[in-house]
């Protein structure tokens, strides 16, 4: 009788090891993978809140009316070729109460419409325009766009990927009245632009 019990126990142990064990292991793996898998919408919202807080801080520190971030992206292909259409869109924006938003206007805009300003940004890393109505100040074709949002002054700084050093976008601050930033204020803006480059690069590569 005891010998039969030993055989039965051996069979049960083998069954647990060979069948039930792997099933339990697989169940644990599935549970862990679900737990570790990030919700892309939740992740995007969290990232957006970080960026929004950063640019709101810039707006407050520099007493701006609007701060925005535009990102370069592929907007599709030309009809008869596979060549991509390079575009940009404003993807983050904060505004002083009562100031009109512009993100909905500047969405999927071909870079060809802003070739001068894009070229200047790529060459120098910034464009500072303290007064759009001053004919002695170069506006690099940005005046028409500024008029849409009611801006009389704009300061724009390029954002770079921290790994590839490629320009990935632009952060800008607008004023509805002419505004000349001091050297210290420009330095603060540039430092925050570098900080934003780090945040956005991390988010894009994560």
Image: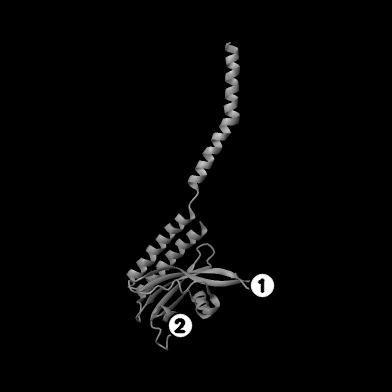
Give the answer, above or below, for where 116 lies relative to 41. below
SS type, badge 1: loop
Residue found 53% across the figure and 38% down from its top: 27
* Location of the N terminus (image quadrant): top right
Residue at the disc numbered 1: 81
Q: Position of residue 63 (x, y in %)?
A: 32, 73
Badge 2 or badge 1: first in the primary sequence: 1
Name the image colouring. Answer: one colour
Using the image as rendered, state which of residue 134 and residue 162 is in the foreground: 134
Q: State the SS at label 2.
A: helix
| Farthest top residue in view | 1
Tell me residue 133's x, y (percent): 39, 86
Residue located at (59% from left, 69% from top): 76
Name the side, left or right, on which 203 lies relative to 177: right
Residue that sits furthest to the right in the current view? 80
Mark 2, other Cα within 10 Å: few <14 / some 14–19 / many ≥20: few
Q: Position of residue 66 (x, y in %)?
A: 38, 73
Q: Nearer the viewer, residue 108 or 170?
A: 108
Mark 1 Cα-neighbour bin, 10 Å: few <14, some 14–19, many ≥20:
few
- Residue 161 lies, in percent from the top left, at 51, 64
Evaluate if marks 2 and 1 touch, with contact meaning CB atoms under 8 Å apart: no
Please tell me whether residue 165 is drawn above or below residue 4 in the rendered image. Answer: below
Q: Work out how far the residue at label 2 is from the one at label 1, CA to CA, in angstroms.
A: 31 Å
Residue 157 sits in quarter: bottom left
Q: Image quadrant of residue 93?
A: bottom left
Residue drawn at point x = 42 percent, y = 64 percent: 195
Check residue 144 in the rendering and tell me which mark sits there, or answer none: 2
Establish if 112 lies above or below 35.
Answer: below
Between 68 and 128, the one nearer to me in the picture: 68
Looking at the image, residue 71 sits to the left or right of residue 52; the answer is: right
């Amino acid at each position: 009788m005891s010998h039969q019990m030993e055989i039965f126990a051996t069979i049960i142990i083998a069954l647990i090891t060979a069948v039930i064990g792997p099933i339990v292991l697989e169940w644990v793996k599935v549970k862990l993978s679900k737990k570790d898998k990030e919700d892309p919408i939740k992740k995007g919202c969290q990232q957006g809140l970080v960026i929004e807080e950063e640019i709101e801080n810039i707006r407050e520190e520099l007493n701006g009316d609007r701060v925005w971030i535009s990102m370069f992206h592929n907007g599709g292909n030309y009809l008869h070729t596979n060549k991509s259409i390079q575009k940009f869109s404003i993807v983050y924006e904060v505004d002083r109460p009562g100031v009109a938003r512009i993100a909905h206007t500047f969405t999927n805009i071909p870079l060809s419409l802003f070739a001068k300003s894009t070229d200047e940004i790529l060459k120098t890393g910034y464009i500072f325009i303290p007064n759009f109505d001053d004919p002695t100040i170069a506006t690099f074709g940005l005046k028409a766009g500024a008029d849409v949002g009611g801006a009389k002054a704009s300061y724009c700084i390029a954002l770079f990927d921290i790994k590839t050093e490629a320009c990935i976008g632009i952060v800008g601050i607008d004023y509805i009245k002419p505004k000349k930033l001091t050297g210290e204020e420009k330095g603060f803006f540039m430092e925050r632009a570098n900080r934003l480059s780090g945040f956005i690069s991390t988010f894009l590569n994560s």
